[in-house]
Image (cartoon, rainbow, N blue to C red):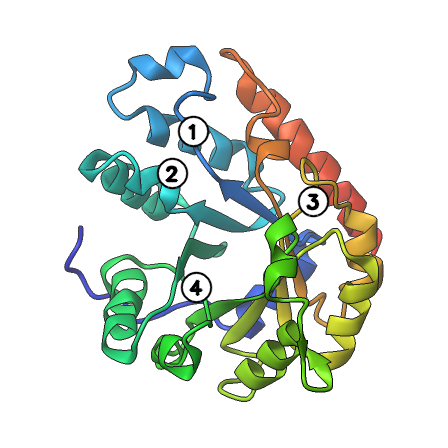
């Protein structure tokens, strides 16, 4: 229930251990849209949780992380927050959890956001927007075993508006990556790096050889597992490849879970060859 204090998250050693045990870097994105879930689940008391429960049961054998996109729950008001909490608490404790909330504000506000996603709700990590500088990131780095996953280089069309602009002798995203990395360690900062940019995956890995990257854009957005693994793996794997639509909407009807299981299995098999 909200208000309880959760002090412990998943440290890097535990995350890496699970990755190598499963030979997987699959992060399943729980972007649960009530307009897209199987129709029979709408009769449930909590349709979003019923769907998520089915997804988690079908994928936990292969997934090393789950990313809950909070926008899909916040849009439903109080009921959505309740669905999100039930989902978070249902995820096995040995699987890394991500609040995809993209928070970031002045220091005292960021402190409250950190309490929301690290104390009130027991997430291991939260995505953070760094536009306001250190004020918007450092408050998330004060919790043992918890991670800030900072927007670095994204794969959306609008990323060119700012991220790819020249900033002195480097591009703006490069300045962001190296500056933010200096505020923490590879044990409490990850970066969001889009999967559709082969050359930039190589460049970012060269800039940050030890950090983990959360990599969206595989599947529906055009990225692929091979490109990410070949260009961004490090000794600890060093990536979490997020797939949302390509897994959670792989099936429909009452037998959706079997199709979801098969989709997750195929992604894990693609990843396993790199271990």
Residue that numbered label 1 is attached to:
33
Label 3 and label 4: CA atoms lie apart by 21 Å
The residue under the point 46% across, 72% down is: 130
| Whole-percent x, y for residue 119 in the image | 25, 65
* Left or right, 93 with reference to 205: left
- Of mark 3 and mark 2, the one earlier in the sequence is 2
- Foreground pick, 101 / 27: 101
Q: Which residue is mark 4?
A: 125
**Residue sitting at x 27%, y 34%:** 76
Q: Give left or right: position of 29 versus 207.
A: left
User: Which tag, 1 or 3, sits closer to the chain's start?
Assistant: 1
In this rendering, would 177 be left or right of 43?
Answer: right
Please tell me whether mark 1 sits on a helix, a strand or a loop.
Answer: loop
Compare marks 3 and 4 and give the one earlier in the sequence: 4
Could you tell me residue 6's position as x and y percent?
Answer: 27, 65
Location of residue 270 in the rendering, given as x and y in whole percent from the top left corner: 80, 44
Circle 1 packing at 10 Å, graded few (<14), some (14-19), many (20+), is few
Q: Quadrant of residue 208?
A: bottom right
Q: Is residue 145 above or below residue 35?
A: below
Residues packed near mark 4 inside 10 Å, few (<14), some (14 to 19) or many (20 plus): many
Q: Would you say the residues marked 1 and 4 are in contact, meaning their CB atoms lie under 8 Å apart?
A: no
Any part of residue 116 in sight? yes
Q: How far separated are the C-alphas under marks 4 and 2?
A: 18 Å
Q: Earlier in the sequence, mark 2 or mark 1?
A: 1
Task: Kindly report which numbered mark, 4 or 2, lies closer to the viewer in this rendering.
Answer: 2
Residue carrying label 2: 72
Residue at which label 3 appears: 218
Nearest the viewer among 77 and 13 is 77
Question: Which residue, as the protein is rendered here, is positioned at the far bottom?
Answer: 182
Decide which of tag 4 and tag 2 comes sooner along the chain: 2
């Amino acid at each position: 229930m909200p208000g309880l204090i959760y002090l412990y998250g998943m440290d890097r050693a535990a995350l890496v251990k699970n990755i190598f045990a499963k030979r997987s870097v699959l992060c399943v994105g729980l972007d649960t849209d009530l307009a897209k879930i199987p129709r029979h689940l709408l009769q449930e008391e909590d349709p979003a949780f019923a769907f998520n429960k089915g997804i988690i049961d079908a994928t936990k054998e292969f997934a090393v992380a789950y990313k809950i996109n909070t926008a899909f729950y916040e849009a439903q008001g109080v009921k959505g927050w309740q669905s999100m909490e039930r989902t978070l608490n249902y995820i096995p404790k040995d699987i890394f959890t991500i609040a995809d909330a993209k928070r970031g504000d002045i220091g005292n506000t960021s402190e409250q956001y950190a309490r929301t996603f690290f104390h009130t709700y027991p997430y291991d990590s939260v995505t953070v927007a760094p536009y306001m500088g250190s004020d918007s990131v450092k408050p998330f780095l004060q919790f043992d075993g918890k991670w800030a996953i900072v927007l670095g280089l994204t794969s959306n069309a609008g990323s060119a508006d700012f991220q790819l602009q020249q900033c002195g002798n480097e591009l703006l995203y490069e300045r962001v990556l190296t500056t933010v990395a200096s505020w923490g360690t590879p044990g409490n900062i990850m970066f969001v790096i889009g999967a559709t940019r082969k050359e930039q995956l190589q460049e970012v890995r060269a800039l940050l050889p030890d950090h983990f990257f959360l990599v969206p854009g595989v599947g529906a957005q055009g990225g692929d597992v091979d490109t990410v693994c070949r260009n961004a793996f490090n000794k600890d794997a060093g990536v979490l490849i997020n797939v949302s639509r390509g897994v959670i909407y792989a099936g429909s009807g009452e037998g959706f879970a079997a199709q979801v299981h098969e989709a997750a299995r195929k992604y894990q098999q693609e990843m396993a060859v790199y271990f």
